[in-house]
Image: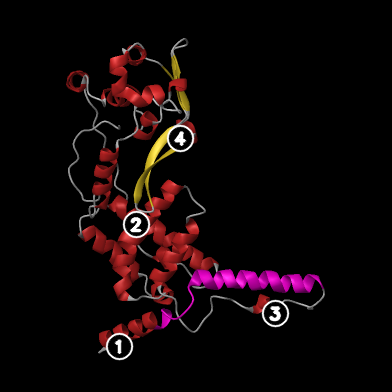
Amino acid sequence: MVLTFERSRGTEIYERQQEEASVQQLLDWHKELTDALQYAVANNWLKFSPIKEVDPCLDNSPVLFTDFITDWLKMMKSRVEITTYTSYERAIIHKIVPYFEPLHYTLQDMEQHPKYIQDFYQHELDRGLTANTVIHYHANIRKCLQYAFQIGMIRSNPADRVERPRKEKFKSEIYSGEELEQLFKVIQGDPSEFGVIMAAFYGLRRSEIVGLKWDAIDFENKKISIQHTVVTAKVNGTVTEIARDKTKTKSSCRTLPLIPACDQMLNNWVTVTSAQQATFIHIWISPVRYLLPMPSSESSRRRQKCENEPDAGDKKEKQPKILRF
């Protein structure tokens, strides 16, 4: 009987909210009214602004958690890097909302019952996701609910009262000298040869290798500068390459010695014949003069297909020994 009542109550709230303004609309209207009334006070048309006593979010109609987190996501789009936003979007739209939407929990429900959040974490872990992936979901939920707390929609953040999954320590496995030699022989002549060598000798990130330009190579002083990156992000449903004059962290922006193996390979590319230049067309005619060609449309389609696969990369599986590249 209790379950039937809770379900019908949640459905009633859900249906009622379809006819009402979203949280973001309320906040936008509240700001416009605040500015207008403050202008009236400044011009002595009013003695004080009555809107100061109004909380736009205190309403007899509870706000669904899924509506609020979706509005919060839209707000974050202009406040974080596009790559950060896409990771938020992937977690919220494809994981968090689909789980909570059928349950019709309100913000107040979440505040009163932190176990609802804990149940979600356990559900994802039971599906085989790693603790580190669930920790990312926790970060999004906590930030969203912290914002709800800051604007007075809830009195406390329920995400602070749950057990966050314990982060799994990364255990690295490195190639031996013999394994690297074998890898270099196998990869010789392959289009990814340069990337593999740079990853093996320098430990560069994929974004740093793809973002290398000719002007980053100082043949005279035997130095290579890491200061530009190229990353991929799903923007409006399309996988897009994003070039930036910055690295993942400030300390990642660095100058390294140009080792003989890389020096020789790059010099070979510079002296390649005209017929061979067609293989590396972007190296020679691209306005930004990247060392490596940008991903082809076919590889972009493959990557987009992989990203559309459910739970791609999330499941706990034994990972093979790989280079950072």
Percent from the top left, x then y, of residue 251?
Answer: 48, 32
For residue 5, the mark is 1
Is residue 250 in the magenta section? no
- Which badge, 4 or 2, comes first in the chain's sequence? 2
In the image, residue 42 lies in the stretch drawn in magenta: yes
Q: Quarter of the image holding residue 107? A: bottom left
Which of the pair 251/73 is nearer the observer? Answer: 73
Q: Identity of the amino acid at label 4?
A: Thr
- Give whichever of 164, 6 is nearer the camera: 6
* Residue at the extreme front: 275
Alpha carbon of mark 2 to alpha carbon of mark 3: how far?
A: 40 Å
169 on left or right of 180: right
Label 2: how many Cα within 10 Å (few below 14, some 14–19, many 20+):
some
Q: Which of pointers 4 and 1 indicates the residue nearer the eye?
A: 4
The amino acid sitting under disc 1 is Phe
Is the C terminus in the top left, top right, bottom left or bottom right quadrant?
top left
Residue at the image point whose x is 42% and y is 46% from the top: 83
Q: Which residue is mark 4?
A: 247
Circle 2: residue type: Ala
Spatial separation of the CA atoms under disc 1 and disc 3: 39 Å
Residue 55 can be seen in this image: yes
